[in-house]
Image (cartoon, helix red, strand yellow):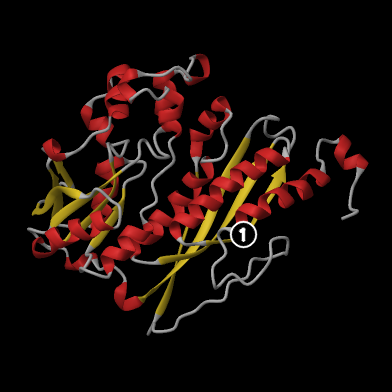
Amino acid sequence: MKSMSESYKAAGVDITAGYRAVELMKQHIARTITAGAASDIGGFGGLFELDITGMERPVLVSGTDGVGTKLKLAFIMDKHDTIGIDCVAMCVNDIICCGAKPLFFLDYIACGKNVPERIAEIVKGVAEGCVQSGAALIGGETAEMPGFYGIDEYDLAGFSVGVVDKKKVFDNSSVKEGDVIIGLPSSGVHSNGFSLVRKIFDIENRDIKQPVAELGGLSLGEALLTPTKIYVKPVLALAQQVNIKAVSHITGGGFYENIPRSIPKGLSAKIDKQALRILPIFDLIAREGNIPERDMFNTFNMGVGMSIVVSADDAEKAVETLKAAGEDAYVIGEVVKSDEGVIIA
């Protein structure tokens, strides 16, 4: 590649750094290649050959999201190889709520200065997220934007597409009183509520690299930077065994905003607060920020990253299937007649 521009470089954009970054990330992208991936990185568009064998009415399901201000933790910790997992998770965890299998993923990285090694670390995390969800990383974009971002800053967003046979889309119209709600544990704060977290801990002016006993010896920075768990494969495995009625990805807005999105009007999720396995990081956030319990459940996942509604008759089998798929799932509540949306008691 002989393309270069000294004038552009003098303005703060080194296009040769972009070429170097692509070369470094190729080893990570190679891990994600699936049967449908039909193009090499570097073209103008990412190609994917859709296999709809056995599907009567294939439906494409898409999701897009970013990582938000959790990126500030990556900057402070100077750790960039897991934030890409968060980006993938925020997209594919939404897609699986419809019962769709993610097919492919594209990322967008905007930065103040293209440091090839750092860009490659970011993509390494994206690739890991793709591997965890079974999606192929078929393309992306890196934009060097000096004067817009600081030289050590970047933003990260992504986009994913999945597919599901229309008859297998999770149908929440079948949810009824007495159905059981199963929780899938989160790995921590995931990628939501970080504007509040940053304010509470004043992370820009605090040493967040010191071990904290309450967090099992992890530093505050390590605990907060723990990547979002990806639930795609366990949910797909469960869908093969029982009838899943509804799924909620518990993100920003916590229990009160997300769970009602998967439950029909006139019904509510009654959550057994005593059954919840609330993680220590949330106790620390609530105490240091003096945050009311209602606000905690309306902002954070509180240790439950995803909720699944099944019939009472299927609950035991569902929990067993999820455990076999590597998720320490457990019953967190039931569906009741109510217009409150969520009842936590």
* Residue 167 in view here: yes
Residue for badge 1: 30
Q: Position of residue 70 (x, y in %)?
A: 48, 34
In the image, is residue 169 above or below residue 110? Answer: below
Q: Is residue 75 above or below residue 192?
A: above
Label tally: 1
Place residue 171 in its image quadrant.
Answer: bottom left
Q: Residue furthest front?
A: 324
Horizontal arrangement in the rendering, residue 73 relative to residue 112 (left or right): left
Q: Quadrant of the C terminus?
A: top left
The x and y percentages for residue 174 are 17, 68
Tell whether 155 sits left or right of 164.
right
Can residue 339 be seen in this snapshot? no
Quadrant that contains the N terminus:
bottom right
The part of the image, by quadrant, that contains residue 255 is top left
Q: Nearer the viewer, residue 49 or 108?
A: 49
Amino acid found under the numbered disc labelled 1: Ala
Q: Write the residue at 23% across / 34% down.
A: 278
Label 1 crowd bin: few (<14), some (14–19), many (20+), radius 10 Å:
some
The kind of secondary structure element at disc 1 is helix
Residue located at (30% from left, 64% from top): 237
User: Can you give x and y, in whole percent of width and height, for residue 85 in the image?
Assistant: 49, 46
Residue pictured at 59% horizontal, 40% vertical? 155
At horizontal 13% and vertical 59% (from top left) the residue drawn is: 315
Q: In this rendering, is residue 13 above or below 319? A: above
Expressed as whole percent of the image width and height from the top left, the position of residue 126 reads 55, 49
